[in-house]
Image: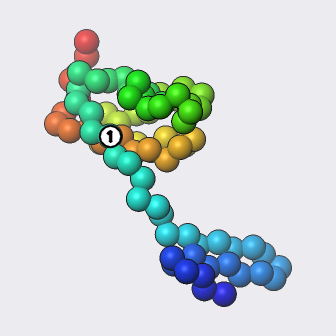
């Protein structure tokens, strides 16, 4: 049965959920910001979760599995140190 906002739920032998992705924040980072971790220093304390390091160098973008914040690499990552 369709719900408001593009979500639908089907009941029966299986449970299926289709939800529209919410507009989550995108944090743009540059090579000097690597390694990227979330929560980042600019986030308020109330939104804290365990720190997780995200690989944005490979795909150019990564999403935090806890809060959904997306991190996007602007430019190219430096090779080596």
Looking at the picture, how far across and down is residue 71, in whole percent? Answer: 36, 40
Total numbered circles: 1
- Side of 11 relative to 78 (left or right): right
Quadrant occupied by the C terminus: top left
Looking at the picture, how far across and down is residue 24, in whole percent? Answer: 42, 53
Q: Residue at x 36, y 23 (%)?
A: 35
Looking at the picture, how far across and down is residue 42, in whole percent? Answer: 38, 29
Quadrant of res 47? top right
Q: Residue at x 56, y 33 (%)?
A: 46
- Give the vertical position of 1 relative to 32 (above or below): below
Looking at the picture, how far across and down is residue 39, in whole percent? Answer: 48, 30
- Give the vertical position of 40 relative to 59 (above or below): above
- Give the SS element for disc 1: strand
Quadrant of res 8? bottom right
- Give the vertical position of 44 relative to 15 (above or below): above
Q: Is residue 61 visible?
A: no
- Side of 79 relative to 45 (left or right): left
Q: Is residue 66 visible?
A: yes
Nearest the camera: 66 or 76? Answer: 66
Q: Residue at x 57, y 41 (%)?
A: 66
- Side of 7 relative to 56 (left or right): right
Q: Residue furthest right?
A: 13
- Give the vertical position of 50 relative to 24 (above or below): above
Pointer 1 residue: 27
């Amino acid at each position: 049965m369709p719900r408001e906002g593009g979500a639908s739920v089907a009941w029966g032998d299986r449970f299926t959920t289709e939800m529209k992705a919410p507009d989550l924040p995108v944090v743009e980072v540059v090579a000097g910001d690597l390694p990227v971790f979330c929560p980042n220093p600019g986030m308020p304390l109330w939104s804290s979760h365990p720190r997780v390091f995200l690989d944005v160098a490979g795909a150019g973008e990564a999403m935090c599995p806890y809060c959904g914040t997306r991190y996007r690499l602007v430019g190219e990552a430096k090779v080596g140190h």
